[in-house]
Image: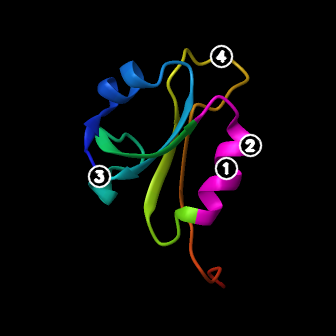
Amino acid sequence: MEVLTINEIKAQYPDEWVLISLVNSDVVARPDKGSVLLHSKDYLELCYKASEIAKNIVTTILFTGEPTKNRKWLKSTILREKPKTI
């Protein structure tokens, strides 16, 4: 998979939700580069498809458009086969 910077991802996928696999899992809060796994205009569609392919991969969902007051534009998660128990 090709590793792109966040600016390259924003240029290639304007105003879309993008699921990226992070190169450096220590930088989940402010990623600087990653590999695009999926992209879509529809956030829920992206999440549904991501749950099928992103198992045990450190990923971030990024919105490449302008954030609004009511929109969360960066979400980070690790999808696991088995849920963590406390």
The type of residue carrying mark 4 is Thr
Is the C-beta separation of discs 2 and 4 under 8 Å? no
Which of the two discs, 1 and 4, sits closer to the camera? 1
Image spot of residue 51 (x, y percent): 64, 61
Disc 3 is placed on an element classified as loop
Magenta stretch, residue numbers = 40-52
Which of the two discs, 1 and 3, sits closer to the camera? 3
CA separation in Å, label 1 and label 3? 20 Å
Q: Is residue 74 left or right of residue 33?
A: right
Residue that mark 2 sits on: 44
CA separation in Å, label 1 and label 4? 20 Å
Q: Residue at x 64, y 45 (%)?
A: 46
Residue that mark 3 sits on: 1
| Secondary structure predominantly adopted by residues drawn in magenta | helix
Q: Is residue 47 left or right of residue 75?
A: right
CA separation in Å, label 3 and label 2? 24 Å
Is the C-beta separation of discs 3 and 2 under 8 Å? no
Residue that mark 1 sits on: 47
Residue that mark 4 sits on: 68
Of the two numbered discs 2 and 4 on the same chain, state the one appearing first in sequence: 2
CA separation in Å, label 1 and label 2? 5 Å
Q: Residue at x 27, y 53 (%)?
A: 23
Q: Looking at this view, is 61 or 41 the one in front?
A: 41
Disc 4 is placed on an element classified as loop
